[in-house]
Image: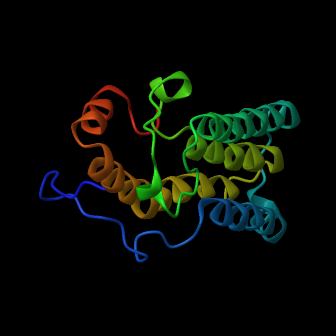
């Protein structure tokens, strides 16, 4: 692994990655259900809530699953707790549109779930997820990928947004 890249680059520590993203997703889904049950007065009328919520969840599942296939084909790790183990920098397909399609997919799953349950408090899970995953997962991953791939990753970062 390269460590000679820009001085602000550092290898992630166990303190950076607090929870595996799927665990965070599950905890927030449970929280959405709890909020919907605990605060039924926060329910709002949403048109086509079943169709739209289901569609958001389906798109989120695809965005979460398809990159895993790409990682497997490239013979590189998908383990978000070990970004320094990445052997290949994926920049094609979905990765031309977003650097984090799996995390975007998880955010859409949360949004879809909150929409399905029609609870405005549950919708707070989405910005909470985005903030947490950015701070404790994406930023450490970016440092590790910069250390691993150097200028190639820096150029990719300039061309493709973190989320959308």
Q: Position of residue 152 (x, y in %)?
A: 27, 34
At horizontal 71% and vertical 45% (from top left) the residue drawn is 109
At horizontal 74% and vertical 50% (from top left) the residue drawn is 114
Q: Position of residue 148 (x, y in %)?
A: 32, 50
Question: Which quadrant of the figure contains the N terminus?
Answer: bottom left
Q: Quadrant of residue 104?
A: top right
Q: Position of residue 98 (x, y in %)?
A: 47, 32
Q: Nearer the viewer, residue 112 or 18?
A: 18
In the image, residue 56 sits, relative to residue 132, either above or below, namely above
In the image, residue 9 sits, relative to residue 57, either above or below, namely below
Q: Quadrant of residue 74?
A: top right
Q: Nearer the viewer, residue 130 or 99?
A: 99
User: Is residue 25 among what the camera can see?
Assistant: yes
Left or right, 70 with respect to 86, comes to right
Given the current orientation, which residue lies at the most extreme bottom position?
15
At horizontal 41% and vertical 39% (from top left) the residue drawn is 162
In the image, residue 98 sits, relative to residue 149, either above or below, namely above
Q: Position of residue 30 (x, y in %)?
A: 77, 66
At horizontal 65% and vertical 41% (from top left) the residue drawn is 68
Left or right, 43 with respect to 128, comes to right
């Amino acid at each position: 692994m390269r460590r000679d890249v820009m001085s602000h680059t550092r290898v992630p520590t166990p303190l950076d990655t607090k929870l595996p993203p799927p665990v965070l997703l599950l905890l927030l889904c449970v929280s959405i259900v709890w909020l919907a049950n605990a605060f039924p007065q926060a329910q709002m009328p949403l048109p086509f809530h079943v169709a739209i919520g289901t569609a958001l969840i389906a798109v989120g599942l695809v965005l979460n699953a398809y990159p895993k296939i790409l990682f497997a084909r490239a013979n590189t790790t998908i383990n978000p707790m070990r970004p320094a183990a990445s052997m290949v920098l994926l920049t094609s397909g979905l990765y031309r549109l977003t650097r984090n399609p799996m995390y975007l997919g998880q955010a859409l799953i949360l949004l879809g779930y909150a929409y399905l349950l029609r609870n405005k408090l549950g919708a707070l899970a989405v910005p909470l997820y985005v903030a947490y995953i950015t701070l404790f997962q994406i930023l450490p991953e970016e440092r590790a990928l910069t250390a691993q791939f150097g200028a190639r990753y820096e150029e990719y970062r300039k061309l493709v947004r973190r989320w959308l």
